[in-house]
Amino acid sequence: MGASRAAAGIVVSRVFGFGREAVFAHHFGNGALADAWRAALRIPNLIQNLLGEGTLGASFVPVYARLVEEGREEEAGRVAGAVLGLLIVVAGALAVAGIWAAPHLAAVLATGFVGDDRVDILAGLLRILFPATGVLALSAWALALLNSHRHLFVAYVAPALWNVAMIAALVAAATAGLMGVDLLRALAWGALAGGALQLCFQLAFLRGVLGAVALSLDYRMRGVREVVGKVFPVIGARGAVNISALVDTNLASRLSTGSVGVLGYAQTLYLLPISVFSLSVAAAELPELARDRVAGRDAVRKRTERAASTVLFWLIPAAIGYIVFREEAMAVYRTGGAFGETDAAVAGLVLAAYALGIPASGTSRVLSSAYFALGDTRTPARIAYGRIALSIAASVSLMFSLDRHTIGDLGLGATGLAIGASIGAWAELALLKKGLAQHLGNVALGGAHTSRYLASAVLATGVGLAIRWALASAPPLVAAAGSIGSVAVAYLWITHLWGVSPPALADRFRRWRRG
């Protein structure tokens, strides 16, 4: 149930996120301004994720959940207040430093922009977005506490407010006649306002759960020392995907104009199934894994296997669907505005390349949670560093040669970056599984069900192809909804008939059939 509530919240947030992306694509398409915006989001997102959800989820939640489970609520509250106080200081200092160093960061973040207008646009956007970084990092503290108390829907639906504020700012500014860089700056101010709105919503709900939290900077408290001691290894492990995205942005800036933008459009879709089905499961299971540690490592292994099987159940068809129906997936951006057919074609190829690594990326999130619950934060960090190095090496070896091939005026170099990311994802999964065996024994990833997940996804894809053929003359959004929706329905039905649906889903099927 916990994963279902988290997934529901993420779905709502992602729906508004796609609305934001569609409005952005309509106004900016995939030109130089889109490149600047995608790059501008990278550093604030990196700091937010490293200080916030990624780090707090893996370092703070296990400690806090254990204290609550042991009946030490007062001590847990003091730890929460101290962590918040330290986070305010660190996030605030980084935000101020980011505003001051924005021109230098812009040149480092996107070296390929140096020498044209994009680097100045990027620096201006960073000055607005860095304060939002601190606000969103504090929001992640609230998310971690809501997770620990199993209020998962509220925790993950809150970012919808961030997306709503950005949509409202962009639409209002465009209606007022703003264009170009001025319109982009309005979007950045909307992001700052949305972060504040998101945090206020979470704090209002959290106050009803915890009451007042006493702020402090007591880093010597035992629980706080334990959290701080895990921070840096966790940053390496949880932050791998963010650091990799930062490197990808820098590399893409060296490719043809539009490559950073097209990479961002593809990544938004790529992250959707991972967020809904992997992040939700990992978020729900991390506190439970920490509690299961008291019961013994066999309990941790069994819970990890169930979580991995659930993630693979959803991510295998998602990966195949993105590869086969990549053009239909891009229909969300085709609103008759600046995002054109060439942009959709190249972004679709990048999405297909990312899709190759979706099952590995999602499952790695679950295995990392098992390590963190067992108190081992260093092994996932070391493996994450190796993943980044391998991804960069593979990307660099592919991207420049692929960029010489074009669709219209847009090079295919970004596809090489996505292929490199997928190669790194599978290597990371293999190493995480091997290392976890030393703690828990062999951890089965999906077990005998995996082959049936794959077969079911292939059969369901056949149904989707038939529907796509039947809807060939329909509007793009209708054809996309029909073909992709039919794949989802067929997959759920086939796996149910074969008896390989996750237990919670199988129970819902039985209740539905009984009426």
Image (cartoon, grey):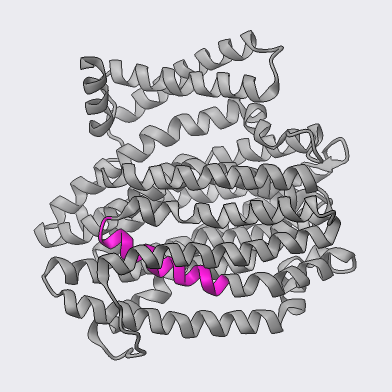
Whole-percent x, y for residue 461 in the image = 51, 19
Relative vertical location of residue 7 with respect to residue 384 in this rendering, above or below: above
Identify which residue is drawn at 42% across, 76% down: 232
| Direction from residue 337 to residue 450 in the image, left or right | left
Residue 291 coordinates in the image, percent (x, y)? 17, 60
Q: Looking at the image, which is closer to me, 352 or 23?
A: 23
As for residue 136 lying within the magenta part, the answer is yes
Q: Is residue 35 left or right of residue 312?
A: right
Q: How many marks?
A: 0
Query: 192 or 112: which is nearer to us?
Result: 192
Q: 181 and 319: which one is in front?
A: 181
Dominant secondary-structure state across the stretch colored magenta = helix
Position of residue 166 relative to residue 68, above or below, is above
Question: Residue 315 at x, y = what percent?
Answer: 44, 36
Quadrant of the image containing the N terminus: top left
Point out the stretch of residues depicted in magenta.
Answer: 133-150
Q: Residue at x 37, y 54 (%)?
A: 154
Q: Residue at x 62, y 43 (%)?
A: 19
In the rendered image, residue 465, in percent from the top left (x then y), is placed at 58, 15
Whether residue 307 is visible: yes
Identify the residue at horizontal 40%, vertical 34% (top origin): 314
The quadrant where residue 445 appears? top left
157 sits to left or right of 495: right
Residue 358 shown in magenta:
no
Quadrant housing the C terminus: top left
Extreme-front residue of the structure: 176
